[in-house]
Amino acid sequence: MAGLRLFSLTGFRMEYGVMKQIFLMLLLMILAGGCERSLDSGNVGFEAPDEIPVPTALKIYHLADGIELKWQISDSDIVAHFNIYYSDQEDSEFVYWDSAHGFTKTITTLNTGQTYYFRVAAVDTNDVEGAGSTTISSQIGVTSIVINNNDVFTNSTDVSVSYVYPVTPLLVKITENSDLSDAVWQNFRQPGIFELSDGDGVKYLYALLRFNDGSESSVSVSDSIILDTRASIDSTYFVADSSVLLAGDTVYFYIDAGEPKGEGYVFFTGLSQLTLYDDGNDGDAVADDGIYSRRYVVPINLEIDEGVVTGRFTDAAGNSADDTPSASRINIAIPPEPISLQTIAESSSQIRLSWSAVEPGSFDFSSYRIYRETSPGVTESSELIANITSRTTLGYTDSDLNDNQLYVYRVYAYSADGLITQSEESSATTIVNTPPSAVTLAVGLIDELTISISWTENIDDDFESYQIYRGNTADVTDLTGQRLTAINDQQQTSFTDVRFDALDTYYYVIYVYDRQGLKSSKSNVESTP
């Protein structure tokens, strides 16, 4: 066949088998007997293309967020890249997914719970694709392990291991070493049992799974648990404001166990069990510090003499510590009868308190303590305003108060051994404040440079100070003048000023301030003669 030429179909991708058949047909036509011209084999300008190898050992490895495909190839010299095909049904047509230049491909955009089928084909440097690999499949899903149903602690070295997996596993490797170097494949069991290494502390388990569809987990999955095989109480103690407690008193109980997340208790005569906390609430200062505590208010009619407070503790792993008593003893007494209290507002800044005396012999008197609030609910945690040590002192004036303000009081009577009785709450509202009365000012000369300033006395009961201002004009005020002094002695009614030149003329004015910060109208303005 004279003038016969070989050609290629640009842009047309043919599988290697089809191309090979076409090549053989052309060769047979050339060699057929009907051709008048001979073909010099030395002049043939082409050779049969190398057979494109088929990927083998295709395998699926499960990742946390997808899968990883891996394969092998017998001859990679003529391979430019690989095409990955998939189908979501076993008998459906495969669809091109993506390409890869290496021997692995990570795929993350897959639907959890769906089974996918994959093939891989090699593509040579002429962009010709070879035959596809064997089809493999696997279901997509999460792989993980759970120790003891997600418990944080265990007091046993034998733990159960539950597995979460997308495909039923056949084999498992599990160990405490992250590189799994000491692990061997073993038959899968759900749940499994693993013996942790000795020694309290955090224990980590790492596992690889091999599934019945031939896939594996790509990286080890892990979980941790704290092994804790013993519990102890370092100390049991309590803190109170008095050595002898009364009804309504507050006492704080503590056990120092050295580890959080457990259960702590104390008990003593009259109290079978009091739960303590390590969560930062109800008297516990710091959450999760291993010190369990509780604020406890003594109830009425409870009396204990030299009681032993005992601590009890069970840790989060279930270990029980030995009961541990406190070094000190608790004493709770029934108090004497309460005292009566009356309050009367005397001015805008003062309230007078009076109360009944503690009867001689009722207990060994130590002091009266007066506590104050601006709303009902006065306790020993309120503001302490007076501590009176004389039993026969039955009155007190509370001063420097705000005007038109409610004040609530309670008086506690203490004994030398800590016993107290307390009054009921009593309250009064201070009188509405008005500005102080102004004074009358007079100015004279002691000599040419020394100026005598005097004024009438202010007699208000909430007096705070006289404040004297000096200026160079007759309209001097506290805003335009220079303040010379503030005098807190209400009975002091004179002051001496000095000028530098006998020809200087100064103007003076005085304001009176009360304890609430109100000021009087200004006095008359007087100048130097």
Image (cartoon, rainbow, N blue to C red):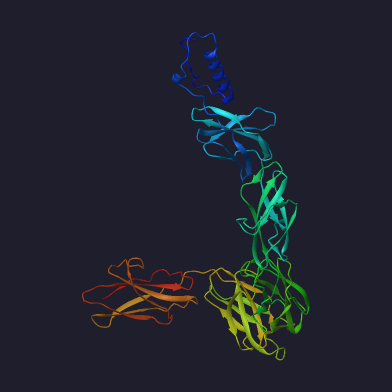
Q: Is residue 480 above or below residue 168?
A: below
Quadrant where the image shows the C terminus: bottom left
Q: Is residue 374 visible?
A: yes
- Count of residue discs: 0
Left/right of residue 182 with respect to residue 28 in the rendered view: right
Q: Is residue 117 above or below residue 343?
A: above
Left/right of residue 80 with respect to residue 90 in the rendered view: left
Q: Is residue 437 visible?
A: no
Q: Quadrant of residue 446?
A: bottom left
Q: Residue at x 49, y 27 (%)?
A: 126
Image coordinates of residue 279 in percent, x first then y, are 65, 66
In this view, the residue in front, 35 or 196, is: 35
Image coordinates of residue 28 in percent, x first then y, are 55, 15
Image coordinates of residue 123 in percent, x first then y, are 53, 31
Q: Is residue 331 above or below residue 279?
A: below
In this view, the residue in front, 66 or 429, is: 66
Q: Residue at x 61, y 37 (%)?
A: 56
Q: Residue at x 27, y 73 (%)?
A: 506
In this view, the residue in front, 340 or 214, is: 214
In this view, the residue in front, 135 or 506, is: 135
Image coordinates of residue 466 in percent, x first then y, are 40, 76
Q: Residue at x 57, y 80 (%)?
A: 397
